[in-house]
Amino acid sequence: MKNLVIAAALLSLPVVTLADMAQYKGEAKQITGAFFEELKGELGKGMKAGGPVAAIGVCRDQAPAIAEKHSQSSGWDVGRTSLKLRNPANAPDAWEAAVLKQFEERRANGEGPDTLAHAEIVEENGSKHFRFMKAIVMPPMDKMPCLKCHGDSIDANTAATLDEFYPQDQARGYKAGQVRGAFTLKKQL
């Protein structure tokens, strides 16, 4: 009887084909790209308006709203996570933490930033989910000023603002080329 129940439960789960996987990956990459471009634009506006201190406010206030907007418009759960958190609300689950560690290993082995992505079908609480992560790799300062808030040489005013907003901040000390975290997406199948 137990085997029959397990077999029935497995048969009720959706079947995912290679074509489905390709479609989900394509959707996830498109959503990630749109999220990144919108966030980058808002951070650029913040940097122009008030430097790194203003950009911190963008990350704190606007980034979650941008993620929520993309979640609502796409039907996916959209967010960011890291092994070294600034915002505790972005803590990785076990699957995300394992993928982030893989990203760090892949990067240490010389893999380029543009290829650091991972997609997988996982079962959670009896249902299947398509999960996707795309690494966020710290760019050189001349490309984007991320290191002004995440690097190892943060000015005193920026550090004080980070300390005020994020008293348990761990997201400092990065160098260009290191994995900072990842965009993370999930869709129930």
Image (cartoon, rainbow, N blue to C red):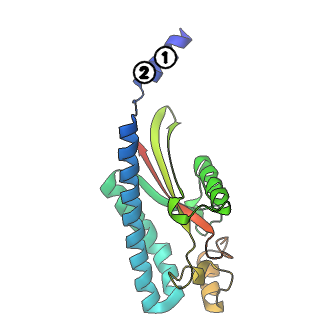
Residue for point 69% across, 76% down:
173
User: How far from the left and from the top, in percent, is residue 73?
Assistant: 30, 57
- Disc 1 crowd, CA 10 A, few/some/many (<14, 14-19, 20+): few
Quarter of the picture holding the C terminus: top left
Q: Is residue 50 above or below residue 85?
A: below
Residue 7 is labelled as 1
- Disc 2 crowd, CA 10 A, few/some/many (<14, 14-19, 20+): few
What amino acid does circle 2 point to? Leu
In the picture, measured across the screen, residue 2 lies left or right of residue 167, that is: left
Q: Quadrant of residue 66?
A: bottom left
Q: Quadrant of residue 83?
A: bottom right
Asked if disc 1 and disc 2 are in contact, CB closer than 8 Å, the reply is yes
User: How far from the left and from the top, in percent, is residue 161?
Assistant: 59, 84
Q: Is residue 1 above or below residue 130?
A: above
User: How far from the left and from the top, in percent, is residue 63?
Assistant: 45, 70
User: How far from the left and from the top, in percent, is residue 120?
Assistant: 50, 43
Counting the numbered discs, the total is 2
In the picture, measured across the screen, residue 57 lies left or right of residue 69, that is: right
What amino acid does circle 1 point to? Ala
Return the residue at label 2.
11
Q: Foreground: 25 or 70?
A: 25
Residue for point 45% across, 40% down:
129
